[in-house]
Image: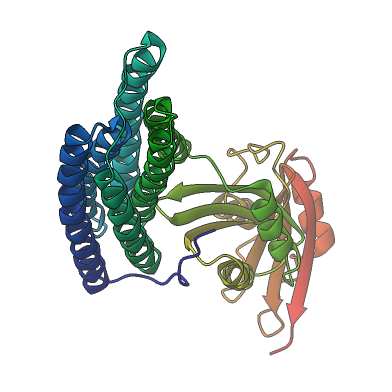
Amino acid sequence: MDQPPKAHLRTDKDLQQEKHAASRVTIIGMVLDAVLGVIKIIGGTLFHSHALVVDGIHSFTDVVSDWVVLAVMRLSRKGPDDDHPYGHQRIETLGTLLLGSILIAVGAALAWENILRLVSGEDLAVPGWPVLVAAGISVASKEWIYRYTRHVGIKIRSDLLIANAWHSRTDAFSSVVVLVSTVGAMVGYVWLDTLAAVVISGIIIHIGWKFTWDSVKELVDTGLSAEDTRLLRAIAMDTDGVRNVHELRSRRMGHDILLDVHLVVRPEISVSEGHQIGMKVVSGMRDAIDNIRDINFHIDAENDEHTPHQTDPNLPSREDIHHLLSQQLGELPPHSRLRLHYLKNRVHIEVFLDEQHPAPALTTESVREVLSPYPWFGSVRVWVSAS
């Protein structure tokens, strides 16, 4: 599997460098494809090889794909803006989908034409030896451009460029088929040339379907594999302070991964401690999977996976409870503070007092007596701290 380098937050300069590298390798490949396409189509026509002609058309589909790559890379490497806060990588996915659709259409048309020629029983001519030369040149040059393009695609983390590299390698594969079928035709099996044309068309269809299907899965927000999801869940569960993990959701944007995860922590900890636990989870996940671009974590005090709307939004606010206590037990001392825990549709209250500002009316028993008639009341504790 192609593995990209470790992810990092890319600046505008990085994006421009990536776009330049992609444009350079794509233009080189496009010129090479055009030259090979002309050589193969002319050679196949002059020396009676249907397989070489189809292979030449395959080379021209590479030219079309190169144009798609140039256009899409220019757009997809733009930085985030107000309308696209996550960036423009999905344009790359759309370009890959378009490229795959073109390949399927071209491959199907070529396959149909050569199947009809094969079953019609028409007289077929024996290919000439220059066909072998053209196919050999194609194999060597397409394997070189495949390796070059794939290297750049991995370096700049571009699925579209990697897909285009594999498209180049299918051209090399199809030229190998031309070599074998031409040799077979020369020794008496003339029909092998037309059969090879059908096989090459099938290769084009297969690679087009793979590009198309992978792009469709990304556009409909298909998540990570079950194996990767289990890995990320285990990392979160092994993080100190995490009691449970739920709603771990993922989706892809180009080669990047976006995650949403809910972490259950102890309800009595502070907001900043909960955030620190979340950041530890983020660090562990990024170390495990390189191409995670963004992790949005939510800290929960209880597991609401099966009842996401478990907490009643109409429970009293801090101001409501403060007003109720002041009304029933007198004004709270100036240095007192409340800590509220909203759990299972009840409010659990902690009152913190300073011994230098006594409040005799504020005791655990008195507050419980005042609040116990209310259905939302859960529990109360009053603490007095020394200065």
- What residue appears at the point 75 percent right and 65 percent down from the top-left corner? 361
- In the rendering, at what x and y percent does residue 147 appear? 38, 64
- On the image, which quarter does residue 280 sit in? bottom right
User: Which residue sits furthest right?
Assistant: 365
User: Which residue sits furthest front?
Assistant: 187
- Horizontal side, residue 46 vs residue 359: left or right: left
The one nearer the camera, 15 or 104, is 104
- In the rendering, at what x and y percent does residue 208 appear? 39, 36
- Horizontal side, residue 230 vs residue 14: left or right: right
The one nearer the camera, 94 or 35, is 35
- In the rendering, at what x and y percent does residue 46 appear? 17, 35
- Horizontal side, residue 6 vs residue 344: left or right: left
| Quadrant in which the N terminus is drawn | bottom right
- On the image, which quarter does residue 104 sit in? top left
Q: Is residue 326 above or below residue 92?
A: below
Q: Is residue 279 above or below residue 49?
A: below
- What residue appears at the point 38 percent right and 37 percent down from the top-left corner? 186
